[in-house]
Image: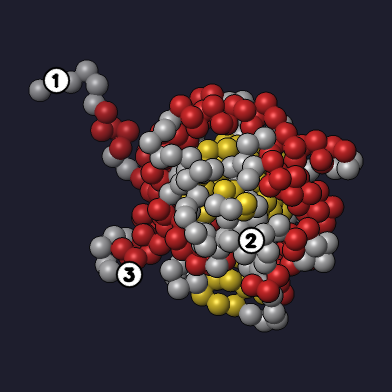
């Protein structure tokens, strides 16, 4: 049999496959989410996220130093707010001596070159567990945006390199950009959760921060997973309003959305490989149904191949060890 082209020639050895690989993972691709709690020398495994932890600030600083030594250069901070500090206005989110603000300062002092990104949303601080201020049964938009802008300024003043609004309120990127500019915070970037879907895969994350909604769901502000064009519209609006980086969340069930967004914008695109996606791999691996290491690399490669320039993932440390 004569064949003009034998495609398998480029697959026949690891060396050849590596040489012609179209998508390569590096430590620069990853953003490491960190969950921070009050206390000292505290480290607690999150039951629904095996191998991932809530940590006190002192242990978080140690973790950040280890991440830097591994070549990981970006962290995304989430804090667990005490119940007694939660209210309907996110008051604690604006506290200059709050856990988030203290965490930013401590990390930048310990590891000045680490890129610090911070979550901007009210759900960790809300007595209702929603991303915005509640009036009756409605999550109100404009009053929430005012608080998010103040929150962003507070984080930037503490030393955050990027603020990352995850709330999906309308107009918040423009308001945050304006607030940063008015306060002389010209170097602070915005990584916008531009296409954040109302997903069933967020459960373990809400366990980690005790931030599940106290009533209803988040479908009046997070996107309907049936929609594709809406994601492009939302993202283009965020870019126009001043977003420096845009994000698609979740990642694994939304690879088509990542590609659509990548094709539509001229700014970096990030994707969040979320807690439920992490938990599924961990659970299947524990049952012996899949090879965990291979599944990690395949998943992250697929997300990057779809168009993500950056990937927020709980697998970051594992991935760096595997690719090195």
The reply to whether the C-beta atoms of the residues labelled 3 and 1 are less than 8 Å apart is: no
Give the number of callouts.
3
Residue at 87% x, 38% y is 182
The label number, if any, that marks residue 2 in the structure image? 1
Front tag of 2 and 3:
2
Disc 3 marks which residue?
286
Residue at 50% x, 67% y is 207
Sequence-wise, which precedes: disc 3 or disc 1?
1
Neighbor class of circle 3 (other Cα within 10 Å; few <14, some 14-19, many 20+) is few
Image quarter (top left, top right, bottom left or bottom right) of the N terminus? top left
Cα separation between marks 2 and 3: 35 Å
Q: Nearer the viewer, residue 55 or 26?
A: 55
- Tell me: 37 left or right of 219: right
Counting from the top left corner in percent of width and height, residue 78 is at 64, 60
Cα separation between marks 3 and 1: 47 Å
Mark 1: secondary structure: loop
Disc 2 marks which residue?
126
Q: Nearer the viewer, residue 304 or 163?
A: 163
Q: In this rendering, does residue 28 appear at all?
A: no
Counting from the top left corner in percent of width and height, residue 50 is at 44, 70
Front tag of 2 and 1:
2
- Tell me: 157 left or right of 281: right
Counting from the top left corner in percent of width and height, residue 253 is at 38, 44
Residue at 18% x, 20% y is 3
Residue at 62% x, 51% y is 135
The reply to whether the C-beta atoms of the residues labelled 2 and 3 are less than 8 Å apart is: no
């Amino acid at each position: 049999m004569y064949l003009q082209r034998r495609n398998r020639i480029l697959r026949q050895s690891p060396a050849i496959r590596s040489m012609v690989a179209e998508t390569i993972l590096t430590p620069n691709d990853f953003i490491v989410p960190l969950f921070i709690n009050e206390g000292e020398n505290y480290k607690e495994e999150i039951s629904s996220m095996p191998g991932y932890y809530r940590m006190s600030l002192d242990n978080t600083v140690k973790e950040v130093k280890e991440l830097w030594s591994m070549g990981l250069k970006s962290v995304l901070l989430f804090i667990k707010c005490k119940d007694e500090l939660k209210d309907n206005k996110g008051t604690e989110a604006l506290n200059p001596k709050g856990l988030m603000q203290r965490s930013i300062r401590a990390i930048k002092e310990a590891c000045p070159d680490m890129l610090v990104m911070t979550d901007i949303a009210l759900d960790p601080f809300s007595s209702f567990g929603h991303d915005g201020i509640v009036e009756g049964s409605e999550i109100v938009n404009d009053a929430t945006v005012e608080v998010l802008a103040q929150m962003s300024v507070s984080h930037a003043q503490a030393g955050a390199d990027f603020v990352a609004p995850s709330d999906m309120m309308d107009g918040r990127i423009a308001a945050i950009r304006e607030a940063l500019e008015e306060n002389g915070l010209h170097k602070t970037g915005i990584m916008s959760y531009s296409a954040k879907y109302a997903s069933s895969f967020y459960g373990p994350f809400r366990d980690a921060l005790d931030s599940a909604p106290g009533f209803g769901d988040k479908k009046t502000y997070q996107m309907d997973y049936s929609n594709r064009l809406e994601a492009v519209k939302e993202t283009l609006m965020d870019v126009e309003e001043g977003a420096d980086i845009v994000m698609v969340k979740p990642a694994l069930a939304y690879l088509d959305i990542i590609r659509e967004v990548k094709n539509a914008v001229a700014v970096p695109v990030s994707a969040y490989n979320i807690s439920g996606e992490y938990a599924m791999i961990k659970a299947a691996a524990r049952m012996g149904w899949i090879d965990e290491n291979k599944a990690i690399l395949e998943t992250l490669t697929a997300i990057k191949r779809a168009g993500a320039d950056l990937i927020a993932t709980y697998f970051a440390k594992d991935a760096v060890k595997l690719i090195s």
